[in-house]
Amino acid sequence: MAVAYIGLGSNLSSKHNNQLLSPQAQLEQALRSLSENPQIDVLNQSSFYQTVAIGPGQQPDYINAVAKLETDLKPIELLDLLQSIEKQQGRERTIRWGARTLDLDILLYDKLTENSSRLILPHPRMHERNFVLAPLMELAPQLEFGDGKNIAELLANCSMQGIVKL
């Protein structure tokens, strides 16, 4: 089984199964959906973090987290599952980096590197994003990347402005 780290984010509420889910509840529901999949074992999850939105226009703050899981799904199958969960929770892909009900990204999948039209691994911008690095550090403080850098070095070089651990 492969170990994967998944970034979770939401800054919009949405109806799911006739319930209005806040951004934090969106993440909780996504984690439940992942844990209910028989091909996934959610090993751990970070705290939730409130972060300033990155993207066009005025947007509400995000709630972000990272989950560590084991899976026997191939990376593209995992991506398909994540996009299916996003869709179930009302995700509409209209504006790049726009507000969204749910965003699920594969950050790392074992030590695999991939660069296809649908999937780039490791996630190409995670080293720039405090909302990924802070929760990832919480889960894997000894994590090292293929380029020789470790999570502590990346986090030390990333501004922590606009991030609050909930």
Image (spheres, helix red, strand yellow):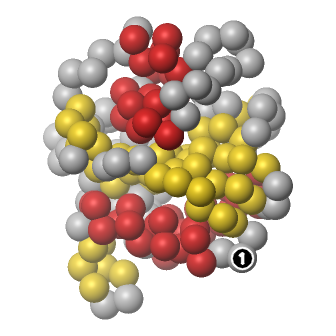
Find the residue positioned furthest to the bottom: 18
Whether residue 52 appears in this view of the structure is: no
What residue is at 82 percent from the left and 55 percent from the top? 1
Q: Position of residue 34 (x, y in %)?
A: 58, 68
Question: Which amino acid type corresponds to the residue marked 1 in the rendered image?
Answer: Pro
- Report the label total: 1
Whether residue 70 appears in this view of the structure is: yes
Q: Position of residue 9 (x, y in %)?
A: 39, 50
Q: Position of residue 139 (x, y in %)?
A: 50, 40
For mark 1, give the secondary structure.
Answer: loop
What residue is at 78 percent from the left and 32 percent from the top? 111
| Near-viewer residue (20 or 164) | 164
Query: Height in image: 137 above or below 20?
Result: above
Query: Height in image: 157 above or below 151?
Result: above
Is 149 positioned to the left or the right of 70 in the image?
left
What residue is at 34 percent from the left and 48 percent from the top? 47
What residue is at 66 percent from the left and 64 percent from the top? 41
* Label 1: few (<14), some (14–19) or many (≥20) C-alpha neighbours in 10 Å: few
Query: Height in image: 55 above or below 49?
Result: above
Task: State the residue position of label 1.
Answer: 38
Q: Position of residue 56 (x, y in %)?
A: 29, 36
